[in-house]
Image: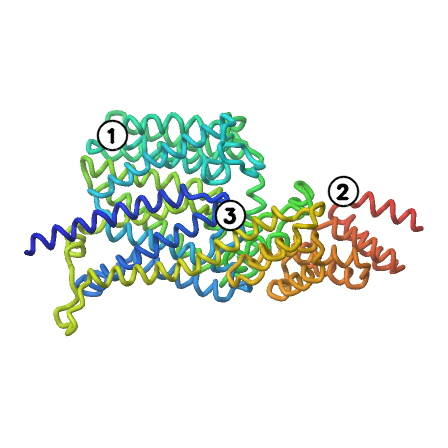
Amino acid sequence: MKNAQNKKSFEELSSVNWFIVWGCALVTLSINTSFYDPFNTPKLIVLFLISAWLTGHLLKSFISYKSDLKQKITPAFILVLLFLVSLLISALLTDVNLTAFIGETQRRNGFLAYFSLSIILLSAYQFINFKYSLRIFKVSILTGFILSLYGLIQVSGNDFLEWNNPYNSMISTLGNPNFASAMLAIISSICSFSLFLKNINRRYKYTACIVILTSLFAILKSESRQGLVTYTFAIIFFITIYSLRIKIRFYWTIVLTSLLVGTISILGMLQIGPLSGYLYKESVSIRGYYWRAGLEMLINKPLTGVGVDRYGAYFKEFREVGYPLKYGFDITSTNAHNVIIQLFSTSGVFVGIFYIILLLYTFYKGLYLVQKTTGENLTITLALLSAWIGFQAQSFISIDNIGLSVWGWLLTGTILGLERDEELRNKIIQSRTFSENHTNKIKVNVFQPLVSFFCIIVVSYFSYFLIQSETATLKSRALTNVTAPQNAPFLYNEAFKVLDNPYADPYYKFIVSTFLYDMGFQDQAKKTLNKLLISDQRNLDYLRAIAYYQKIDGNVNDEIKTRNEISKYDKYNAANYLELFKLFQSQGAISNASEIKSKILSFAPSSIQAKEVIRLSENYG
């Protein structure tokens, strides 16, 4: 009877492991062309559903494990909990709560995303052992085959889906060449390491070889250095640590060569050294502006940051003057393009510190595990740790894209989990029931489905509203055509599916309001915009739209107030100051106009706006 029960326990564990790994793959592969954001929101919804089901398994494992508290409350668990509690506090204190929880438009890096990623991490930590870790390699190979094949189709110009894509055509299912190349690089590194594993059969290894070749070709065609950096760091780390670990002949030569190549590569990315012509891109320099703006946000609000995923709302206030002068006054960024700086700047010092400690703890435990293991387990450990290093390398210059970051959190949980005591893990796996002192004799295997189904219902309810806002916003855009007034009533109906949606992205409500304005519903559009501005008074999109409407209506005094408000949050925008100059000049407010002129000339003397304000001053005089 006991053997049968244990067999059932291990069968269930096997299915949970498949669910974890394939769930991560499904997050990466998810797209929906009927959504306004066809990449990020579908991935977020799938991530919600996967983590909702795993929540039941985690709680069941935690409650049913009959042991003392020290064995349950591990350092990994404490670090994740502290990270989430700190992030939750920052989210609750964020000025726009909806953005704090579901994330910025086309980013979706809110609290709920990180909570779901943490569930993935803890599930991998709790359930994946060396035997089941091979499934990460197998699923990575199959996922890489799909991603690289689709990337090649895009590169060849035969994409069967029509994307509104301003980037290089190689975006795969990630929506951006940088994300796609980084994802393929991580997959390629895992595929490369799988070739050295004895327990991976030949069919998988042959497929892995195909994935490596096609992925590297797609990465080169994407013209994204991010993928090359990720793959290079993973391979160099593997070679270096493996050489040190087994002390092969001339291992110090290998180590020093690896370090030299890595250093030259980093310098090349910074436009220094012989590889600068191959590795440097302008996008590397622009990240310096993003990082410095993020650090200024942290200095300004060190405890809670400017708000979870609210980097974009504060960027223009904290950006350096060189950024608008070089790239344009209306160009902005909604992310620091560095995961650590993003977390520090938007969520505060505690979230950032706990995240860094979690990374350092993972790295330490990974190296400790490399030292402790031998044979096949050594290769598995070092392969996963090397892929994790590749992920962290790209996160230093990139955004926490859900389809990509889910693998980073999976690898983190797996590395920490493999380091745990195997005997302790077996006790967790085989424990099946609540304490015998429970009078109602409720079995744990009933508890898990109930909890999982409850979480699925809650997530599905929330996801329904996300889906509705995505589809209705896209339909509203398609119906907006000033030459087709017959579309107006249909647009009105679709628009209110967004406006009345309690969980719709505020930006979606804004753009839907502009659609309404264009199709003749000006009063409703203005009413919606004013309501949005009350909830987010520093939103420059709202303020610029209001100023535009005031200009059309001839409300000069109101427009002056609005543009002065814009200048508080966008102090280096010469285009806005030029409009203010014109308004003051039209009102005969010469001293005010002169003050605005001096301000433009102080930071943008060579700009088109400066030349225009000088011309207008001469004509007025």
Kind of residue indicated by mark 1: Phe
- From the viewer's perspective, is the residue at label 2 or at label 3 nearer? 3
Label located before the other in sequence (2 or 1) = 1
Badge 1 marks a residue whose secondary structure is loop
Q: Where residue 283 sits in the image (x, y, percent)?
A: 56, 37
609 lies above or below 595: above
**Amino acid found under the numbered disc labelled 3:** Phe
Residue at the image position 39 percent from the left and 46 percent from the top? 27
Residue 457 appears in the figure: yes
x 60%, y 56%: residue: 495
Outermost residue to the front: 486
Left or right placement of residue 382 versus residue 484 in this view: left
Location of residue 570 in the rendering, given as x and y in whole percent from the top left corner: 67, 54
Question: Which mark is nearer the camera, 2 or 1?
Answer: 1
Question: Can residue 267 be seen here?
Answer: no
Question: In the shown orientation, is residue 322 left or right of residue 610?
Answer: left
Q: CA distance from mark 2 to mark 3?
A: 39 Å
In the rendered image, which residue does mark 3 sit on?
A: 35
Q: Could you tell me which residue is drawn at 87 percent across and 45 percent down?
A: 615
Residue linked to disc 2? 607
Mark 2: amino acid: Ser
